[in-house]
């Protein structure tokens, strides 16, 4: 088994990653890196993290054999890693617990976050309440309008939600604004980034905090199915749930890793959020990675039925995994994701997040041409309660 | 000697400090860029910083963000920014021009081609906001080979090691960020900036310019006592935003001439 030790000391995964921020943030990032590397190796930090994941988040999350869905597809067996059962309803809480613990040890009294659909905002507001820290969440004004329920959840948890009016008024602009807040309040503020992107050490740190997902699978799959899966699938926006489940599997060369991006109205339409499938390398939000950009290097607006995948970049480790061939990346369009969403509701009694429905759709595409003893493991990264309004509107159920 | 070095040398000889206005190319329109640059020089500007518009200007406050959005709405590209410098250079062979922007449009063009076109159009310095020194090595050496200065930022949070490191490698001038925040913010601590500029000076041979949040003549005058140059960005862009098109050049000239007087007296 080959040892995988990315990123290097400067935060590079091959030619991706790095620390592309203004000098005004360098000191804060260097401090974060030093502190994180210290606590990463600190057994008492790791023990407390495990305790919190068990008792507060509700880990380990089970793996569920979706038998009716598998029978329906008449091919490979589909297994679901049930991150939807976590506290707050998605994998996002794994990372926010870890970063909040780090913020507390660094003496920061205030945490900030960016959010698109609101899941990371809710997970951040949750841990801020849990650890007694002030919390400000930046959210594009367009998303504030579309995700009113999550805005209310964040406010209930005591967070201040700041609508961002600049640029396209969505996730990328919320991230810009959070960076601007951080640079202004750098002495007392910890920035909890919600995905495996941003300047080093964020891509590594967010991956590490989510890696518990894949680590659990490594022991759960042999217990439940007698072996490791043939393919692990996860949706990819920024890519945190995918890195969480992929990372422990990277050295297991016989397991295919497949990331599923948001194909929106189809890659040919230009209305999508598939940075790896259709983007080009560039620099945004502190790292070099694949970006959706025009010929002049301006970032272009993205489209997806799922707000959580609606981001023009992607974590740099995914860029590396793509180029190195260790992981494959495909796109699923809005319509296919919706079909998978309905299938899981009707056949298994599980309402998946629209984000996770993209990974599920890819599994449903592959299963029929595979043998019944083969296994597809899908990271069901979140539950779909937040998506009721979107689905009802698209499917005409009300 | 480079245009930047010659300019600072001339200023030192006449006991004056550099006045460095900044605006985003393409705001309010591409055709006004060269006339604006000439107006700034007439009003007493010594060096000019030109912003390259970018869709995601993370280090900028609302004023410069809006300027970038207005420029992008008109489809202004990095190629056009370089063409503006070339046109200006044909009319003014002495005033240094520094391009300031973000990495992605430059990487999209290609570092080598960008450096080459900078040299051809008469750019004197380049400041890439999201290229701290450790990420700027490739572009830095391409620019250096063409005698173009890489301008680096230092900030109130820069550690002593970084001040020493960047101070030693700096060319042209150092851009000291006068506050913890984004461009255009309004809480400069004059005494702190004075102390910090002295700290930076101990580690570098190049002049030290100060910018971010300098909004009035009194602040510019106070900072001109300790620094070698003063950058006026958001305040200038605000004046441009507030000007009816017919008065734009006149109002910009008046504003910058006022800063010039404050700094010289």
Image: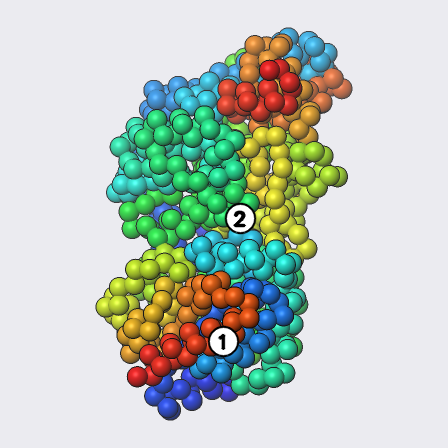
Residue B146 picture location, percent across and down: 59, 77
Q: In this rendering, is residue A236 above or below B230?
A: above
The label shown at residue B250 is 1
So how many labels did they put on this image? 2
Residues A289 and A324: in front is A289
Image quarter (top left, top right, bottom left or bottom right) of the C terminus of chain B? bottom left
User: With B265 as the anchor, is A240 left or right in this view?
Assistant: right
Q: What mark, if any, has residue A167 been given in the picture?
A: 2
What residue is rendered at 44% in x and 28% in y? A150
Residue B183 at x, y percent in the picture = 41, 60
- Residue B100, disc: none
Which residue is pictured at 38% across the width and 48% down the height?
Answer: A181
Residue A23: which quarter of the image?
Answer: bottom left
Q: Of tags 1 and 2, which is closer to the observer?
A: 1
Q: Are marks 1 and 2 on the same chain?
A: no
Q: Residue at x 37, y 53 (%)?
A: A183
Looking at the rendered structure, the secondary structure element under dot 2 is loop
Q: Chain of mark 2?
A: A
B175 lies above or below A309: below
Q: Residue A101 lies in what quarter of the image?
A: top left
Q: Nearer the viewer, residue A157 or A50?
A: A157
Q: Position of residue B116 (x, y in %)?
A: 64, 72
Q: Chain of mark 1?
A: B
Write the residue at 57% across / 28% down: A355
Secondary structure beneath dot 1 equals helix
Answer with the quarter of the image where residue B256 lies.
Answer: bottom left
Say above or below: A385 vs B107. Answer: above
Cα separation, mark 1 vs mark 2, equals 30 Å
Q: Nearer the viewer, residue B114 or B210?
A: B210
Q: Is A35 left or right of A196, judged from the image as shown?
A: left
């Amino acid at each position: 088994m080959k040892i995988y030790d990315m990123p290097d000391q400067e935060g590079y995964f091959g030619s991706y990653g790095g620390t592309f921020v203004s000098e005004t943030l360098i000191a804060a990032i260097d401090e974060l890196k030093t502190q994180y590397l210290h606590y990463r190796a600190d057994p008492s930090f790791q023990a407390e993290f495990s305790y919190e994941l068990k008792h507060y988040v509700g880990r380990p999350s089970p793996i569920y054999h979706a038998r009716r869905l598998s029978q329906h597809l008449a091919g490979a067996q589909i297994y679901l890693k049930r991150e939807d059962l976590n506290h707050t309803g998605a994998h996002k809480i794994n990372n926010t617990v870890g970063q909040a613990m780090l913020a507390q040890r660094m003496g920061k009294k205030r945490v900030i976050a960016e959010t698109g659909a609101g899941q990371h905002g809710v997970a951040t507001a949750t841990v801020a309440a849990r650890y007694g820290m002030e919390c400000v969440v930046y959210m594009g004004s367009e998303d504030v309008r579309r995700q009113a329920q999550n805005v209310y959840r964040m406010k209930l948890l005591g967070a201040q939600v700041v609508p961002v009016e600049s640029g396209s008024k969505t996730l990328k602009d919320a991230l810009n604004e959070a960076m601007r807040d951080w640079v202004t309040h750098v002495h007392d503020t910890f920035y909890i980034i919600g995905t495996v992107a941003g300047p080093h050490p964020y891509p590594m740190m967010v991956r590490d905090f989510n890696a518990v997902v894949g680590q659990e699978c490594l022991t759960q799959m042999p217990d439940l199915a007698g072996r490791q899966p043939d393919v692990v699938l996860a949706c990819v926006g920024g890519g945190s749930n995918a890195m969480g489940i992929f990372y422990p599997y990277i050295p297991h060369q016989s397991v295919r890793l497949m990331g599923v991006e948001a194909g929106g109205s189809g890659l040919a339409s230009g209305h999508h959020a598939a940075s790896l499938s259709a983007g080009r390398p560039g620099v945004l939000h502190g790292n070099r990675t694949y970006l959706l950009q025009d010929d002049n290097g301006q970032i272009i607006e993205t489209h997806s039925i799922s707000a959580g995948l609606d981001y023009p970049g992607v974590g740099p480790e995914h860029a590396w995994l793509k180029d190195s061939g260790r992981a494959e990346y495909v796109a699923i369009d809005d319509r296919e994701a919706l079909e998978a969403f309905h299938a899981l509701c009707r056949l298994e009694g599980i309402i998946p997040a629209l984000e996770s429905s993209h990974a599920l759709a890819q599994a449903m595409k592959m299963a029929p041409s595979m043998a019944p003893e083969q296994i597809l493991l899908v990271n069901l990264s979140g539950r779909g309660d937040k998506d009721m309004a979107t689905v009802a509107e698209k499917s005409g159920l009300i | 000697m480079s245009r930047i070095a010659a300019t600072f040398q001339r200023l030192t000889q006449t006991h004056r400090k550099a006045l460095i206005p900044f605006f985003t190319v393409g705001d309010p329109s591409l055709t006004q860029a060269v006339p604006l640059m000439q107006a700034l020089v007439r009003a007493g500007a010594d060096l000019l910083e030109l912003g390259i518009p970018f869709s995601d200007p993370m280090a900028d406050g609302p004023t410069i963000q809006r300027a970038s959005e207005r420029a992008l709405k008109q489809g202004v590209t990095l190629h056009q920014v370089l063409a503006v410098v070339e046109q200006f250079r044909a009319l003014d062979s002495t005033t240094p021009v520094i391009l300031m922007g973000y990495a992605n449009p430059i990487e999209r063009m290609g570092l080598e081609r960008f450096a080459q076109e900078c040299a051809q159009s008469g750019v004197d310095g380049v400041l890439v906001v999201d290229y701290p020194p450790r990420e700027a090595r490739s572009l830095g050496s391409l620019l250096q080979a063409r005698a173009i200065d890489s301008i680096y930022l230092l900030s109130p949070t820069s550690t002593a090691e970084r001040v020493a490191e960047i101070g030693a490698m700096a060319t042209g001038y150092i851009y000291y960020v006068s506050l913890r925040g984004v461009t255009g913010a309004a809480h400069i601590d004059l005494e702190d900036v004075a102390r910090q500029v002295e700290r930076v000076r101990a580690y570098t041979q190049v002049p030290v310019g100060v910018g971010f949040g300098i909004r009035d003549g009194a602040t510019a005058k106070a900072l001109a006592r300790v620094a070698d140059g003063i950058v006026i960005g958001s305040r200038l862009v605000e004046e441009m935003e507030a000007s009816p098109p017919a008065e734009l050049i006149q109002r910009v000239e008046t504003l910058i001439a006022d800063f010039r007087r404050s700094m010289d007296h």
